[in-house]
Amino acid sequence: MSRAQQDALSRTALGVFRLNGQFLAVSEKLAEPAGLTAAWWQVLGAVLPEPLPVAGIARVMGITRQSVQRVADLLVREGLAAYAPNPAHRRAKLLAPTEAGRAAITRIDPGHAELAARLTAALGGQDAFDETVRVLDRLSAALDVVVAEAERAG
């Protein structure tokens, strides 16, 4: 590995860590009026399209199953989500949003839409935003490949 490659990796990691912190801070502010936290919003958002098991949510979000389990249990306790039987796996129940959970997410939509519009403008338009998403997706996919190869190599 060259020094330039190491520097690029370090700059990328630091940039992503900073970006993660920025997104978490903004997400907390957006979620607060709906009575949610950023973590609650993340987990509810993951199951809006379809119910998922906790392990599936963790995979999609790139975090530990235990972290998702804690949040999922809180969401269920607060009536924002519910566990449902999983026909594919008896013990791994599916998490699904309740009507109250969907309503909470809906309350975030106006602030979310405003932030999206402002960020799109700051990036220079929709094409630039779409390219940013493509680059981040490529980076994530490449890291998945590299990690999987390293794990296979032992």
Image (tube, grey):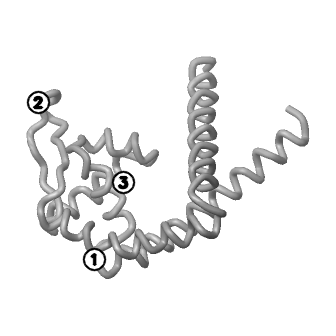
**144 is higher (above) or lower (below) than 40:** above
Examine the image and state in which quarter residue 74 appears: bottom left
**Quarter of the image that includes the C terminus:** top right
Which residue was labeled with disc 3?
A: 67
In this view, the mark in front (1 or 2):
1
Q: Earlier in the sequence, mark 1 or mark 2?
A: 1
CA distance for labels 1 and 3? 21 Å
Residue 60's spot in the image, x, y percent?
40, 42
Q: Are marks 1 and 2 in contact (CB under 8 Å)?
A: no
**Kind of element beneath mark 1:** helix
User: In the rendered picture of this protein, how many numbered marks are placed on residues?
Assistant: 3
Image-based side of 114 in relation to 72, left or right:
right
Which residue was labeled with disc 1?
A: 34
Task: Name which residue type carries label 3.
Answer: Ser
**Would you call the spot at circle 3 few (<14 residues within 10 Å), some (14-19), or many (20 or more)?**
few
Task: Name which residue type carries label 2.
Answer: Pro
Q: Earlier in the sequence, mark 2 or mark 3?
A: 3
**Kind of element beneath mark 2:** loop
Examine the image and state in which quarter residue 124 appears: bottom right
Which residue was labeled with disc 2?
A: 87
Task: Name which residue type carries label 1.
Answer: Ala
Residue 91's spot in the image, x, y percent?
15, 35
